[in-house]
Amino acid sequence: MNNEHRENLVELAEYEGKCPICQGKLVIKDYKYTAPLVGDLLISVSKCENCGFKHTDVFLLSTNEPRKVVYRVEEPGDDRALLVKSSTCKIEVPELGVTIEPGIYSQGYITTVEGIILDVISITESLCSSGDAPLDKCNEVLDKLRKAHRNELPYTVILYDYLGVCDIINDKKKPVYEPLELNQE
Ligand SMILES: [Zn+2]
């Protein structure tokens, strides 16, 4: 982290909790981070002194109603949009068959739309490298993902944002926000 970033990082609170792995002492530190375009973020970092468990999460500080964030990637550069993904947020890319479910151990992070696609490519490659992976299916899926990464295939990134704390941010192209029913899948 360079100095410019450090100025934008303010420690808000430090408190203790229980480690979900070993029940040991968990030290939780919350930071406020102000980023250009994004605004104020809450970054929460938990560390267990006993077993080394570590968890990071990220939330928008200005919370919204539960919402669906729908972002189309159509042209080169669209995939450079920032994605604020908290652990509570579900990501779907229907055209590519991608679903990233939230879960207790999922982390929050800031990435780009391209970063998500690259993650999915590397996870798929590693799943497909096991001996009993279905080769035809693997090649088909990877081919689609790589085309999407080269901007040869338009796709839609949908965030199911139950707490209204996730977002996709691009100063040139805004996502569409839709209300999210809490029982909606
Ligand atoms: Zn622990």
Image (cartoon, rainbow, N blue to C red):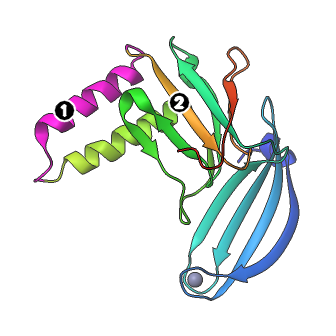
Q: Is residue 106 left or right of residue 15?
A: left
- According to the picture, the residue beneath numbered tag 1 turns out to be 139
Q: Residue shown at 35%/42% (left/top)?
A: 122
**Residue beneath the point at 40% across and 38% down:** 98
The image shows residue 6, relative to residue 146, as above or below, that is below
The answer to if 136 sits in the magenta stretch is: yes
Nearest the camera: 184 or 92? 184
Tag 1 secondary structure: helix
Q: Position of residue 165 (x, y in %)?
A: 74, 46
N-terminal-most mark, 2 or 1: 1
Total numbered labels: 2
- Residue 111 in view, yes or no: no
**Does 171 sit left or right of 131 as displayed?**
right
132 w.r.t. 91: above or below = below
**Amino acid on which the number 2 mark rests in the picture:** Val
Residue 153 painted magenta = no
Q: Which residues are magenta?
A: 131-152
Residue ID for mark 2: 157
> Would you say residue 74 is visible in this rendering?
yes
At 37% from the left edge and 13% from the top edge, which residue is drawn? 152
Of 5 and 109, nearer the camera is: 109
